[in-house]
Amino acid sequence: MTASRSDFLVLVLNCGSSSIKFAVFDASGDPLPRTPLWNGKVQGIGGPTPDFGETGVEPYRIELDAAHPYRSALAVIRQHVLARLDGRPLGAIAHRVVHGGSKYFRPIRVDGDILADLESYIPLAPLHQPFALEAIAILLNERPGLPQIACFDTGFHHTVPQVEQILPLPFDAWQRGLRRYGFHGLSYEYMATALAERHGDAARGRTIVAHLGSGASLCAMRNLESAATTMGFSALEGLMMGTRTGSLDPGAILYLMEIEKLSLEQVGRILYHQSGLLGVSGISPEPRVIVRHEQDEGETGERARIALDLYVRRIVKEIGALTAVLGGLDMLIFTAGVGEHNAFIRERICRDLAFLGVALDEPANTDNAPVISARDSAVLIGIEPTNEEWVAARHAVRLLQAQ
């Protein structure tokens, strides 16, 4: 361990394709404080107008090296973090790594061999995996003595039964590692902690958590452990998302390649970047933007309505499927950017779940209250802000303590 338990800090990096979010946690607190000392992000990486912002500093334009924008963005973060350490040492850097495959599900300190292993999972999560690993590689080279801790989004779903993991392919595919892994695990892990604190034993029943952000998935929990989830082998399966398709008939992909002669690269771009809410609406990947066009005349309004109807329909269908797996539903929790802040999306989902006895308290829903179900609702409906960065920081501290 590089610093004593009483004085070190943990830096958490959450790396995406065009942004790097960071948060700095004080490891001297026991338990680890949920709120970071400060946080921020570089966004617009690779675009014409990247910017940087952090706690107490409004976002402002920055210049990044056009040849190496990601490395340049990391350097910006490093410069600003070091300027605010006030003489206290960094004990570790914790990284959200989307995919750990079938081999890695517990947080681990990364070395060169483990990094090479993790790079083999890049095709399974191309929007996230390469960028987290690039950050780790850069920091391993620049700060070889500073522990780099990988925390896996697939890890929380290690408890799902085999019947939820296996794909209906020839059995040797399972033996080669083609299986449903599940994602958004750091978010669901936080939910397992926060829901128990807020709702007590009630949270240990049949719970579905809806992580609705630019990426989206559902997790069915029993006794606060993952029993089933909508994302599987890759981060494409399940719900319709901001720019991703969600579940799609494989025959449609074969058609695009065989009949329309699209290349693998072109199909990948469609599935990950040009579909979902953006693709159907032609307006935006953000529900709050699309809803402003629902009453527009002509094709614009029609596509806006279809996009939101399809988005809600897919969520409702998957909640129904997971309710069947759980044998009923006691609690439905919304989290992440859309889930926490889009009252109209929650209202439409709950409206279509009335057959389950779901009843919404409309003023509470409008206020984004922790509990938004009506008193006579058969299902408790709630909102719980997620905190993936804290989960990663806590893993890093525990791993260092164990060394």
Image (spheres, helix red, strand yellow):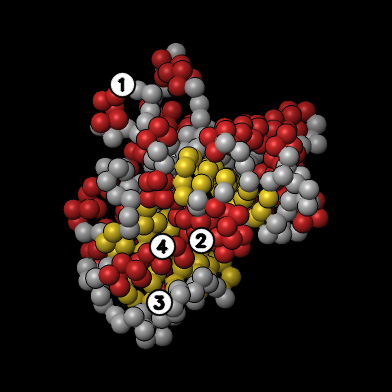
Circle 2 Cα neighbour tier, 10 Å, few/some/many (<14 / 14–19 / ≥20): few
As displayed, is residue 262 above or below residue 162?
above
Name the residue carrying label 2: 193
Front residue of 90/368: it is 368
State the quadrant of the N terminus: bottom left
Give the number of the mark in front: 1 or 2. 2
As displayed, is residue 37 above or below residue 131?
below
Q: Earlier in the sequence, mark 3 or mark 4?
A: 3
User: Residue 170's mark?
Assistant: 1
Name the residue carrying label 3: 27
Measured from the top left, where is residue 326 in percent x and y?
Answer: 54, 38
Give the number of the mark in front: 1 or 4. 1
Q: Secondary structure at mark 3?
A: loop
Q: Give the amino acid type for the residue marked by disc 1 in the picture.
A: Pro
Residue sitting at 22 percent across and 49 percent down? 116
Q: Give the amino acid type for the residue marked by disc 3 in the picture.
A: Ala
Residue 324 visible in this rendered orientation of the protein: yes
